[in-house]
């Protein structure tokens, strides 16, 4: 640990504030000094070994949302995925951070994203998803109040029907739910991956037993690009502090993220922000999170920066409170693999926001502790590799012990993993301020945890090498193309494909939960 | 499975992989009958698919369209859907549409329309472009941008590589060509300046014009203030608008209000460093590629761009009086009367106009 901290200061010196080189140098030195004197920031973040849940053979999960659906006090999950058998899974949380199938829903074609929301205003949580494929649709599974959901109702399709609205775009990937027009009900925004736009569908209420939606805004992204913008995620939050929900969306192809300001319920145009050069390379932006990184009360933007060479990074765009992002900060990232997903949260309850990225090839996570609050400097505490592609991550208190655990999706490995937080919490947990250090394995039993050390690399290396071509049609094969290729992966390519490596046997010791 | 096919098609489209029809043309192609169903007569309704199948099994064009012909069609004609059921101008849930020529034109510029559903983009493009006669733009005597269509010389920061922008002086004209490719060809015209100013752009092109005005430099942030798509062979178009202080760029490409055109207007010049393979298909140009453009600098209060600040401009300003709704896209064809750029047409703008009378 000592050696690691000693290495950490030079690492922090690499933080780059692109708005001012002089400021960068000054802040880096100041932050380094502050960090070494701040005891609160010296306890490494630690997590237990993963508990895995494996999905059936044809199911490749893409993301999830967590919530106690059945009121038993445990976190349940709804998991989107790509499945040739047209399924979507609701998982019931069990003891020891385990999950079992509670319900299997029919979800025609692939579903990359889902959100919980009370769409019909009946007080029960519904499940909103976007179906990709040749005939894309926005659908809702109405909540039945007991943690289960009804069959899908189409809200928006490509052509009007008696029960659904027209106006769906092409290849919907991400969705965000919020009251965008301020009328008290839940509206839906959709990122159209092959439509190169974000659509906003307004909820007009339930009329004659039919939930009525209408597309009220469409904002094209990356129109000035020679290549394809390919928006993946869309996230809602009040970015400009005017009391309504704005939208941000990342572009896999464009290497940018876009801010769409809400103007009285309408979205007319985007302000597109570019990832800064990192060691001469332009990173891809694979995911996006709105989070207050500098504790100044506004939402900043956190991004995993995928670089096709070298160490990965985390990039922060700092909000000045009005929705202007004038400062870009590059922080350390995963030492191995390609950064794909991100979640920023206070993992040790010390009052600042830490960061975790999910990687691809190999999969796994990199847990990064915040070493100061005002700036955005990180130190990698824990970077175990496992699986192939950590497509989605979230921080959720799975075991009810008050701290935030990690749940991730290995999109290619057909699995979901839970890593329980074993970090001594600074405040608030177990009723003891300063929280006694706790160590526990996957079942909650006390074990010795090698604090601060990297886990041994997984015995399961990446199954194949990345294939990079000019997928976004911008004339070069670079990080953005690698990001597009990773996002497109459903299952591992044939091992005789160009650039592929032979697939190793799955280690026998790997935990496998029942999927029935 | 359809989703996988669609995603595969998208990926194929992204990497530019398309099925190519054989050169052989069977006498019975096209003929009546669905290529994917058994029927008594030889040949089938989709010319391209019919040719592929008959090239593999000539009996399909000599005797009858048998089950083996259907099997070949199902195997080989994935993504070939012209003609198909459904009006070209109406959204429907299957690929292709009934008017063969229109269908072929639309799928040439938007391959999604032959893989996924005939969605609103396909239908809107059909309605807007299918019956428009092609045109020729007279570019005699106009200086050429001197950009071979296999190069990207004036494309700003449209891609990972960064190129220069065209700096066109007030009153100057330029001509050039726009093609598709990776990246698609764009023309970036610098409209930088220390203060707000009014310009008029006069433009004509043989392809559907997509013209946009974007703020911000290479590192961003960037905001497209407006995007105008006057259409295909719309004749000479004149846009009068105000630029914003700082870095601004006028970007010309091919496209419509819904999407950029990235297919159907191939470069037809040979790159000496990367000559085409003899086996490559000939370049496809479903529309012409030439454009000409002129930029004029006007007085800031010359709202209608007629060269004088007078009662007509006063009328335009008074018609636009009041706050500008930021929730609506900017219509560059409407009078741009917010002379001070404060988001409202008001007394301050009136003062500027009167002081420039």
Image (spheres, rainbow, N blue to C red):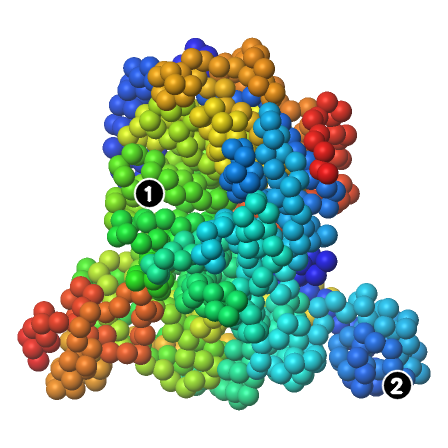
- For residue B121, above or below residue B136: above
Residue drawn at (56%, 27%) of the image: A419
Using the numbered discs, state the Cα–Cα distance from disc 1 to disc 2 in whole angstroms.
Answer: 67 Å
Position of A408 with respect to A198 (left or right) is right
Question: Dot 1 surroundings within 10 Å: few (below 14), some, or many (20 or more)?
Answer: many
**Disc 1, disc 2: CB below 8 Å?**
no
Residue A403 locus on image (x, y percent): 45, 26
Residue A250 seen in the current view: yes
In the image, residue B75 lies at what x, y percent? 81, 65
Q: Tell which tag, 1 or 2, sits nearer the viewer.
A: 1
Q: Quadrant of residue A205?
A: bottom left
Query: In the rendered image, which quarter contains the C terminus of chain B?
Result: bottom left
Q: Nearer the viewer, residue B163 or A110?
A: A110
Which quarter of the image is occupied by the N terminus of chain B?
bottom right
- In percent of width and height, residue A150 lies at 60, 54
B103 relative to B139 in the view: left or right: right
Which chain is home to disc 2? Answer: B
The residue pinned by badge 1 equals: A299
Q: What residue is drawn where x is 55% and y is 88%?
A: B131
Q: Residue A402 or A70: which is nearer the viewer?
A: A70
In the rendered picture of this protein, how many numbered marks are placed on residues? Answer: 2
On the same chain, marks 1 and 2? The answer is: no
Q: Does residue B141 appear in the picture of this structure?
A: no
> Which residue is labeled 2 in the image?
B41
Q: Is residue A192 above or below residue A52?
A: below
Instruction: Give the structural element (helix, strand or loop) at label 2.
Output: loop
Tag 1 subunit: A
Which mark, by number, is residue A335? none
Q: Residues within 10 Å of mark 2 (few under 14, many from 20)?
A: some
């Amino acid at each position: 640990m000592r050696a690691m901290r000693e290495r950490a200061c030079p690492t922090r010196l690499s933080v780059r504030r692109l708005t001012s080189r002089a400021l960068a140098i000054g802040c880096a030195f100041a932050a380094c000094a502050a960090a070494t004197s701040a005891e609160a920031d010296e306890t490494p973040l630690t997590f237990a070994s993963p508990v895995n849940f494996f999905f059936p053979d044809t199911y490749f999960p893409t993301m999830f949302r967590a919530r106690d659906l059945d009121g038993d006090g445990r976190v349940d999950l709804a998991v989107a995925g790509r499945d040739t058998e047209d399924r979507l899974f609701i998982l019931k949380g069990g003891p020891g951070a385990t999950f079992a199938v509670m319900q299997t829903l029919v979800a025609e074609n692939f579903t990359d994203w889902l959100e919980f929301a009370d769409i019909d205003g009946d007080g029960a949580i519904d499940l909103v998803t976007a179906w990709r494929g040749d005939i894309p649709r926005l659908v809702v599974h109405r909540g039945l109040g007991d943690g289960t959901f009804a069959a899908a109702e189409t809200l928006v399709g490509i052509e009007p029907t008696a029960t659904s609205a027209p106006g769906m775009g092409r290849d919907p990937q991400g969705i965000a739910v919020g009251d965008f027009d301020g009328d008290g009900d839940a509206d839906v925004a959709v990122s159209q991956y092959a439509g190169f736009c974000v659509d906003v569908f307004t909820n007009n209420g339930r009329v004659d037993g039919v939930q009525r939606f209408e597309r009220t805004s469409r904002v094209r992204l990356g129109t000035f690009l020679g290549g394809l913008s390919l928006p993946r995620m869309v996230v809602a939050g009040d970015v400009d502090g005017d009391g309504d929900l704005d939208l941000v969306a990342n572009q896999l192809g464009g290497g940018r993220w876009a801010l769409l300001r809400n103007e009285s319920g309408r979205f007319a145009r985007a302000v597109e922000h570019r990832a800064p050069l990192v060691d001469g390379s332009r990173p891809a932006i694979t995911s996006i999170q709105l989070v207050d990184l500098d504790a100044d009360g506004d939402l900043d933007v956190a991004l995993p920066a995928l670089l096709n060479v070298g160490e990965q990074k985390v990039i922060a765009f700092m909000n000045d409170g009005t929705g202007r992002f004038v400062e870009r900060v590059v922080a350390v990232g995963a030492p191995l693999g390609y950064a794909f997903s991100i979640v920023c949260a206070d993992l040790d309850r010390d009052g600042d926001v830490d960061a975790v990225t999910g990687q691809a090839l190999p999969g796994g996570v990199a847990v990064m502790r915040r070493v100061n609050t005002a700036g955005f400097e990180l130190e990698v505490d824990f970077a175990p590799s496992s699986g192939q592609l950590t497509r989605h991550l979230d921080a959720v208190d799975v075991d009810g012990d008050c701290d935030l655990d990690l749940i991730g999706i290995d999109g290619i490995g057909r699995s979901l993993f839970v890593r329980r937080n074993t970090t001594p919490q600074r405040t608030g947990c177990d009723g003891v301020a300063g929280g006694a250090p706790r160590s526990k394995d996957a079942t909650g039993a006390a074990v010795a945890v090698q604090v601060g050390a990297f886990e041994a690399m997984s015995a399961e290396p990446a199954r194949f090498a990345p294939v990079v071509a000019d997928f976004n049609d911008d004339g070069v094969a670079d990080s953005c193309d690698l990001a597009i290729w990773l996002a497109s992966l459903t299952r591992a390519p044939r091992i005789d494909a160009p650039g592929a490596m032979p697939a190793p046997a799955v280690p026998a010791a790997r935990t496998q939960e029942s999927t029935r | 499975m359809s989703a996988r096919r669609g995603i595969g098609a998208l990926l194929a489209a992204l990497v530019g992989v398309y099925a190519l029809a054989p050169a052989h043309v069977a006498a019975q192609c096209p003929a009546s009958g669905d290529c994917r169903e058994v029927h008594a007569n030889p040949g089938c309704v989709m010319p391209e698919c019919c040719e592929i199948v008959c090239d593999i099994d000539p009996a399909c064009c000599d005797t009858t369209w048998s089950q083996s012909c259907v099997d070949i069609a199902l195997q080989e004609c994935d993504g070939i859907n012209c003609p198909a059921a459904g009006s070209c101008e109406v959204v429907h849930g299957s690929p292709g549409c009934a008017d063969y020529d229109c269908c072929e034109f639309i799928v040439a510029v938007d391959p999604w329309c032959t893989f996924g559903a005939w969605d609103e983009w396909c239908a809107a493009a059909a309605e807007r472009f299918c019956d428009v006669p092609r045109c020729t733009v007279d570019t005699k005597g106009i200086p050429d941008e001197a950009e071979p269509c296999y190069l990207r010389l004036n494309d700003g920061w449209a891609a990972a590589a960064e190129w220069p922008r065209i700096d066109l002086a007030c009153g100057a004209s330029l001509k050039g060509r726009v093609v598709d490719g990776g990246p698609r060809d764009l023309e970036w015209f610098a409209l930088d300046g220390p203060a707000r100013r009014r310009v008029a752009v006069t433009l004509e092109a043989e392809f559907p014009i997509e013209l946009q005005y974007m703020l911000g430099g290479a590192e961003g942030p960037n905001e497209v203030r407006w995007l105008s798509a006057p259409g295909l062979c719309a004749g000479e178009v004149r846009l009068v608008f105000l630029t914003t202080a700082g870095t601004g760029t006028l970007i010309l490409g091919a496209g419509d209000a819904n999407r950029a055109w990235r297919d159907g207007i191939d470069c037809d010049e040979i790159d000496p460093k990367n000559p085409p393979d003899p086996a490559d298909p000939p370049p496809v140009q479903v529309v012409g590629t030439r454009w000409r453009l002129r930029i004029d600098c006007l007085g800031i209060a010359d709202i209608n761009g007629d060269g004088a600040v007078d009662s007509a401009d006063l009328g335009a300003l008074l018609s636009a009086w009041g706050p500008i709704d930021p929730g609506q896209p900017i219509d560059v064809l409407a009078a741009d009367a917010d002379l001070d750029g404060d988001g409202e047409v008001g007394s301050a703008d009136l003062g500027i106009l009167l002081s420039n009378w």
